[in-house]
Image (cartoon, rainbow, N blue to C red):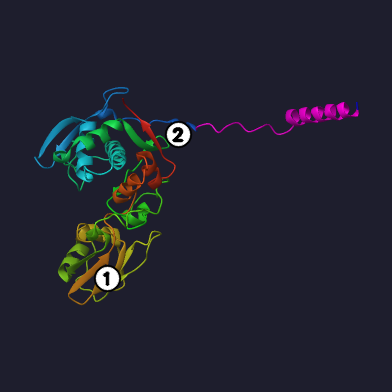
Amino acid sequence: MVKMKWILVFLIFMFVSTSCGTPAKKPMQPTKEKAMLPKIPDKISRGYNKEPVLKVYIAQTGKIETMLLEQYVMGTVAGEIKNDWPLEALKAQAILARSYVLNFVNNEKSKYTDADISTDFEEAQAWNPSNINSNIKKAVNDTRGLVAVYDGKYIEAWFHSDAAGRTALAKEGLNYKKSEPPYTESVKSDDIKVAPPNIKNWSYTFTKQEVLSALNKMGIEISDFKTVKIGAKGISGRTVLLDFDKIPVNAPDFRIAIGSEKMKSTMLDSVKYDGNNLTIKGRGFGHGVGMSQWGAYQMAKNGAKASDIIMHYFKNINIVKLWK
């Protein structure tokens, strides 16, 4: 009888606790922002759930061609990454390429009249349809309509060749003029071992006149300098400022002005000026922001999926499908 009494007391206690106390938490639901889809720009849209059409200025021929967006993406993936790479790395590149062009059409204007975008590498992405093979086709077809978004908007889908071990923030690697995007971050990138020797470590010697010409191109009107030193560095270790005597010069902008194929990155190890020539030594290739292509290669080799790769290099984003 006593035992039954205690069981009854326990059941009453449990009922009071669950009905009057703090209610149990519900499973987390997807946020409204995560469910938001970006708008396809009106000028290239073919209606709901249909593939957009682009007017592309072909730099190689000087003519504008009309093509389906996925056709353009195939050419950019073939131009930006090797066609024999692991499929998941190619897929990641395809998603970013697709995101890039839609963001460009939405927010930028091509310098070529009547074109939505071009194959001019300086304006947009590299484009080489002659490199399209079955791997490229599969990567693009398997990711058809997929784009990377943040808060219902296309991301700035930055990518580069080799991060030299760590990626950069946009302001650090690109001298980005707007506020730092909420989805960029500096992360470790497993690309050091797999990158080719000529981008893993590189060196280039510029003449004094080449340096002065680059500075003048940047609007820095100096006719002489005596010293060059590495100045401020960013979170990833990249050089943000180069000091010419006492004049601070933005390193990412200087790289573009003097030649990004020569000064391959701003992950610099040393700068030496002897009065006639400036020798710059560094590591990696590209601005260092967003996805490292050689990092994507290694992640894919290790078994990562395309979405894993993209979400490693960009934080708090979603990959959504816009057309079938």
Please tell me whether residue 27 belongs to the stretch shown in magenta.
yes
Q: Give yes or no for contact between labels 1 and 2 (Cβ–Cβ under 8 Å).
A: no
Q: Could you tell me which residue is drawn at 39 percent across and 30 percent down?
A: 37
Give the left or right position of residue 185, taking residue 161 as reference.
right
Residue bounds of the magenta highlight: 2-30
Give the x, y percent position of residue 318. Answer: 41, 37
Crowd band around label 1 with a 10 angstrom C-alpha radius: few (<14), some (14–19), many (20+): some
Q: Is residue 169 visible?
A: yes
Give the x, y percent position of residue 80. Answer: 22, 45
Q: Is residue 218 visible?
A: no
Residue 34 circle label: 2
Tag count = 2
Mark 1 and mark 2 lie on one chain; the one further toward the N terminus is 2
Give the x, y percent position of residue 182. Answer: 43, 46
On-image quarter of the C terminus? top left
* Amino acid carrying mark 1 in the image: Val
Find the residue positioned furthest to the right.
1
* Amino acid carrying mark 2 in the image: Lys
- Frontmost residue, 255 versus 1: 1
> In the picture shown, does residue 192 fall above or below 324?
below
Q: Could you tell me which residue is drawn at 30 percent across and 43 percent down?
A: 89
Give the x, y percent position of residue 227. Answer: 26, 75
Dividing the picture into quarters, in which one does residue 165 lie?
A: bottom left
Residue for badge 1: 271
Q: Could you tell me which residue is drawn at 14 percent across and 33 percent down?
A: 65
